[in-house]
Image (cartoon, rainbow, N blue to C red):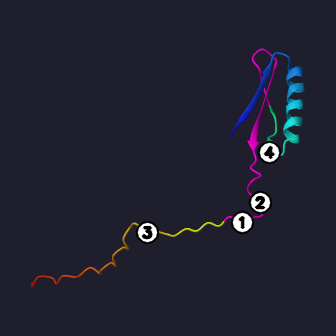
Amino acid sequence: MPQVRIMGDDSDHVEQVVSLLLALIDAAPSLTAGDPTRLRHRSGGGRIVFDLNATDHRTPADRPMRVHGERIDNQPAPRPRRAPTRRELPPG
């Protein structure tokens, strides 16, 4: 999944840029953004990441998808067990 990362030394500026980007992405019908995650930045600035997905509007959502599968057994069926034969005791 594609991920967008915005980093900078000024955490307020990073927040402002992310707000603008999320507003632009929300306005685009072919893009969907995930929830932003705020991470620590080494120098104390801001670091925000979020997932970005492209939605495909060319495929109608109301068209059902049909999947068909067949079972294939590669192992032969087990042989039936035979009862063990009993031997007679030798004459005494």
Question: In the figure, 42 relative to 73: above or below?
Answer: above
Q: Give the percent coordinates (x, y) of residue 82.
A: 29, 80
Mark 2 neighbour class, 10 Å CA radius: few under 14, some 14 to 19, many 20 or more:
few
Q: What residue does disc 1 label? A: 64
Whichever of labels 1 and 3 marks the residue nearer the N terminus, that label is: 1
Mark closest to the chain's N terminus, 3 or 4: 4
> Disc 4 designates what residue?
30
**Disc on the earlier residue, 1 or 4:** 4
Query: Which amino acid, mark 2?
Result: Ala
Which segment did they paint magenta?
38-65
Q: Residue at x 36, y 71 (%)?
A: 76
Residue 72 is one of the magenta-drawn residues: no
Q: How far is mark 2 from mark 3, CA to CA?
A: 35 Å
For the residues marked 3 and 4, what is the alpha-carbon distance in whole angstroms?
43 Å
Which structural element holds mark 3? loop
Q: Secondary structure at mark 1?
A: loop
Is residue 72 shown left or right of residue 6? Answer: left
Q: Which amino acid type is marked by label 1?
A: Pro
